[in-house]
Amino acid sequence: MADMGHYSLWTVLNALDLVGPTSVDPMLSHACAFRDTVATTVNNDFSFPMASAVRFKYPARGSRPAVDLIWYDGGMRPPTPPELDEDHRALEAEQMMFVGDKGKILAGFRVENPRLIPERRMSGYPAPPEPQPRQQGAAYQPSPGIRQWMAACRGAKQQSAGSFLNAWPISEAVNLYAAALRSRRKLLYDPEKMEITNYAAANQYLVREYRKGFEPDSV
């Protein structure tokens, strides 16, 4: 599977119950500068690279087999699949592709409008309705998620699917990706112990030493 934007992974991680990757394999670009007329790599230890990709390996879980999840960033993308060559199409800048044993599905950035490729495999299936643009001047209607957030701010029970109790698997994956980029190497991860097992120095990126909190002045 491939995608261009980590928050679009939310649907995928939930649907496939992806928890606890066992390896994180990064591929990243680097910037160069000239030093005494010689090209040299610029050390970047403060931000994401201009472009990168990562392969997460998730083990089998219940009835689901093992899954490889690949995330492309900064304009990188997978090779154009032959199914799109047949349709005389190219991958768009932001899409999601699911690769299975029996074929491929191409969907939008948020997994909208999923379609089998090539298009002939959709023969007999009606095309999904086109999303209707919001009419100018129409009254704003908050989404269900926004309404849940507003209700929680007013004291109601928190019911959002995006709560921290549900969001930790995607947070774990993205934090591991950042650690792999800083380490510039493939990392093996023990999700039970929450530690990197093949490069101990990378574990420093998984924890933070917080400053001491404020204390009231003594009287």
Image (cartoon, helix red, strand yellow):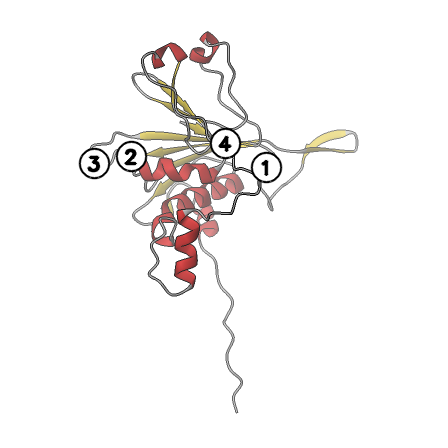
Q: Answer whether labels 3 and 1 touch (C-beta < 8 Å).
A: no
Q: Please provide percent x and percent y for residue 67.
A: 32, 30
Query: In the visual, does 44 lie left or right of 129?
Result: right
Discs 4/3, front: 4
Mark 3 belongs to which amino acid?
Gly
- Mark 4 surroundings: few (<14), some (14-19) or many (≥20) residues within 10 A: many
Q: Please provide percent x and percent y for residue 151.
A: 39, 59
- First in residue order: circle 1 vs circle 2: 1
Q: Is residue 22 visible?
A: no
- First in residue order: circle 4 vs circle 2: 4
Mark 1 belongs to which amino acid?
Pro
Discs 1/4, front: 4
**Which residue bears the numbered disc 2?**
59
Name the secondary structure under disc 4: loop
Q: CA distance from mark 4 to mark 2?
A: 22 Å
- First in residue order: circle 1 vs circle 4: 4
Q: Is residue 49 visible?
A: yes
Of residue 32 and residue 117, the one placed in the foreground of this image is 117
**Which residue bears the numbered disc 4?**
4
Q: Answer whether labels 4 and 3 touch (C-beta < 8 Å).
A: no
Mark 2 belongs to which amino acid?
Pro
Q: CA distance from mark 4 to mark 3?
A: 28 Å
* Up-down relation of residue 153 to residue 40 (above or below): below
Query: In the visual, does 139 lie left or right of 70?
Result: right
**Which residue bears the numbered disc 1?**
49
Q: CA distance from mark 3 to mark 1?
A: 36 Å
Q: Which mark is residue 62?
A: 3
Q: Answer whether labels 1 and 2 touch (C-beta < 8 Å).
A: no
Discs 4/2, front: 4
Discs 3/2, front: 3
